[in-house]
Image: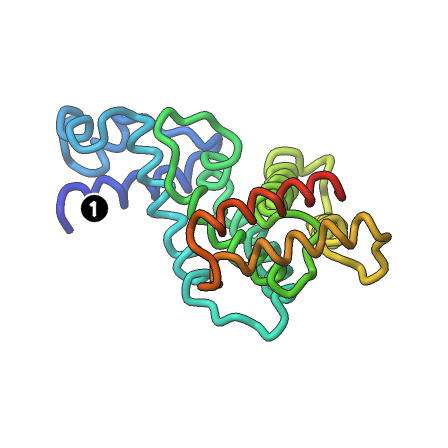
Amino acid sequence: MDTKAVILARAAELLAASPNGDVSTRAVCEAAGVGQPVLYRLFGDKDGLLSAVVDEVWDEYLAMKRAARHSADPVDDLRRGWDNHTAFALSHPHAYRLVFGSTLSTPPAAAAEAMGLLTGILERLAAQGRLRMAPADAARFVMAANSGIALGLILRPGTYPDPAVSTAARDAALRAVLVDGASPAPRAAAVAATTLRAHLGASDLYTPGEAALLDELLERAQQQAG
């Protein structure tokens, strides 16, 4: 391994073994057999190092999500994605907390990729007319609910002693964003607008200007109906 890979590997080991989720750059340098100037040259500062370590730890989880084959029903993918997210959080509490429960000055790329993969599932649901709101809004809602319950399980085990609470939270979150088949007329109009917006990007019927105008009008209808 090159020097950067060695530093990341040792830092990941120290992070996983840490009782409180903190590691010092001095300890990382000693474990990697390098001087602190080398670490700072490669990562900028401690936050840069931790951000890179988090992305390294998260990569295995995200690689699994990237390679996952779509189910026939996107809702199954949504449920499985939630459960895998919670399981990863419980298996890697410190790396998880650094993404969703800290304010690193260098944001890990893992958070943005996880959000992008979630949004992709919700876009499939929107295209099927099964989403109550725009995919980006639904993604923010689901991610906030999922990360919130995962952090609760990690940081407040006395308050959340049973991991099954994640399943209950998952089902409640999905009910909030998915169409139940019995929506009143205003809500049905919002769902229809969401569905049409989801299909705009794949249509070649409109010029870019026409598509942008139609998207704006549908967004307005979506907001008024919702």
Q: In the depicted view, which residue is nearer to us: 207 or 179?
A: 207
Colour basis: rainbow
The secondary element bearing badge 1 is classed as helix
**Residue 21 seen in the current view:** yes
- Write the residue at 61% across / 57% down: 196
> Which quadrant holds the C terminus?
top right
- Write the residue at 71% across / 36% down: 158
**Above or below: residue 97 compared with residue 37:** below
Q: How far across and how far down the image is residue 82, in percent?
A: 60, 54
Q: In the depicted view, which residue is nearer to us: 182 or 121?
A: 182
- Write the residue at 70% across / 56% down: 192
Task: Using a 10 Å C-alpha cutoff, classify the residue at mark 1 as few (fewer than 14 neighbours), some (14 to 19) or many (20 or more).
Answer: few
Q: In the depicted view, which residue is nearer to us: 29 or 37?
A: 37
**Above or below: residue 54 compared with residue 38:** below
- Where is residue 144, by image quadrant? top right
The residue singled out by tag 1 in the image is 5
**Above or below: residue 107 compared with residue 191:** above
Q: How far across and how far down the image is residue 12, in percent?
A: 34, 42
Q: How far across and how far down the image is residue 88, in percent?
A: 52, 51
Left or right, residue 112 beside residue 79:
left
Left or right, residue 36 beside residue 71:
left
- Where is residue 161, by image quadrant? top right
Q: How far across and how far down the image is residue 143, in percent?
A: 59, 44
**Residue 146 seen in the current view:** no
- Where is residue 64, by image quadrant? bottom left
Left or right, residue 113 beside residue 88:
left
Badge 1 amino acid: Ala
